[in-house]
Amino acid sequence: MSGRPEGQADQWTGVVLAGGRSRRFGGVDKTRLPLGGRTLLARALDALAPFTAGRLVVGGAPVAGVAQVADAAPGEGPLGAILTALEAIDTPYALLLAVDLPFIPGSLLGKVRRAGAEAAVALVQAPDGRVPLCLSVRRETAPILREWFERGTRRVRALEDLAPCAWVAAEAAPPPGALWNVNDPLTYARALEMAEHDCPAC
C-alpha cells in the first residue's frame, strides 16, 4: 500500500447499509440470515475490514460488538442511510456496502477505495448497467446530500452529480455470484446453493 494518506485504512470507516425489516422476507431481519457459516451482516463486516479502520452499521436490528446508528430516514431508501452514515463518521471517507451483497470481491472493494481517495464519490458500474450499493463517499459531501435529500431526492444515482465522480467498472465477466443481490427468498435460496458449491466469489 502506498504511503499517501488517502490510501491508509485509518482514513476510512467501513459502513454496512443494513436496511430495515424486509417485507419480501416476511419481516425477517435478513442481516441475520446464515450463509456459508456466517450471517449476511458478518460477511459484509468481514469484507470491509481489510480496507477500513472502523466499522459502522446503519439500520437493522441491534447488534453487539460493532458501532451502530439508526437510519435517520427509514423506509426512504439507501440515500438516506448513506447520509446518516456520513453524518455519523469521523473519518474523511466512508466505504459503504449493502448487507445484501454477500459475495462482493475484496478486489472490487479495493478498487472502489482507491478511486474514492481521488473523488467525492466512487461508484461501481455493473456489466448490465446496474449501480450496486458498493461505493465510497467523502464525508465532506454530507451537507450537499442533506440539501438534496430535503428537496426530495431519493435516487442513489444522484450521487454521480457529486464532483468529481469516479466510476469503477466491474469486470466484464465477474466471478459468478460477485454482484449477487439477496433481496427475496428466491435470491437467498440461490445464494445458499452458490455457497455450497464453492463459486469463485463465494
Image (spheres, rainbow, N blue to C red):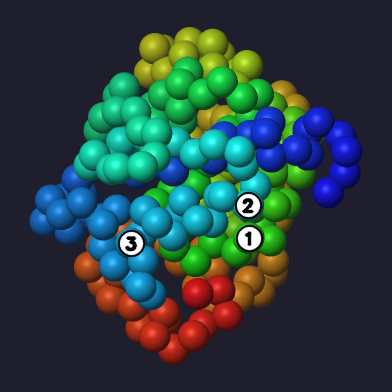
Sequence-first tag of 3 and 1:
3
Q: CA distance from mark 3 to mark 1?
A: 18 Å
Q: CA distance from mark 2 to mark 1?
A: 8 Å
Q: Residue at x 54, y 56 (%)?
A: 47
Q: Is residue 127 left or right of residue 1?
A: left
**Is 153 or 19 nearer to us in this picture?**
19
Q: Is residue 159 left or right of residue 74?
A: right
Q: Is residue 155 above or below residue 194?
A: above
Q: Which residue is mark 3?
A: 39
How far across and how far down the image is residue 42, in percent? 40, 56
Sequence-first tag of 2 and 3:
3
Q: Is residue 55 left or right of residue 116?
A: left
Residue 50: image tag: 2
Q: Which residue is mark 1?
A: 106
Q: Residue at x 39, y 85 (%)?
A: 196
Q: Is residue 155 above or below residue 107?
A: above
Q: Amino acid at mark 1?
A: Gly
Q: Residue at x 28, y 76 (%)?
A: 189
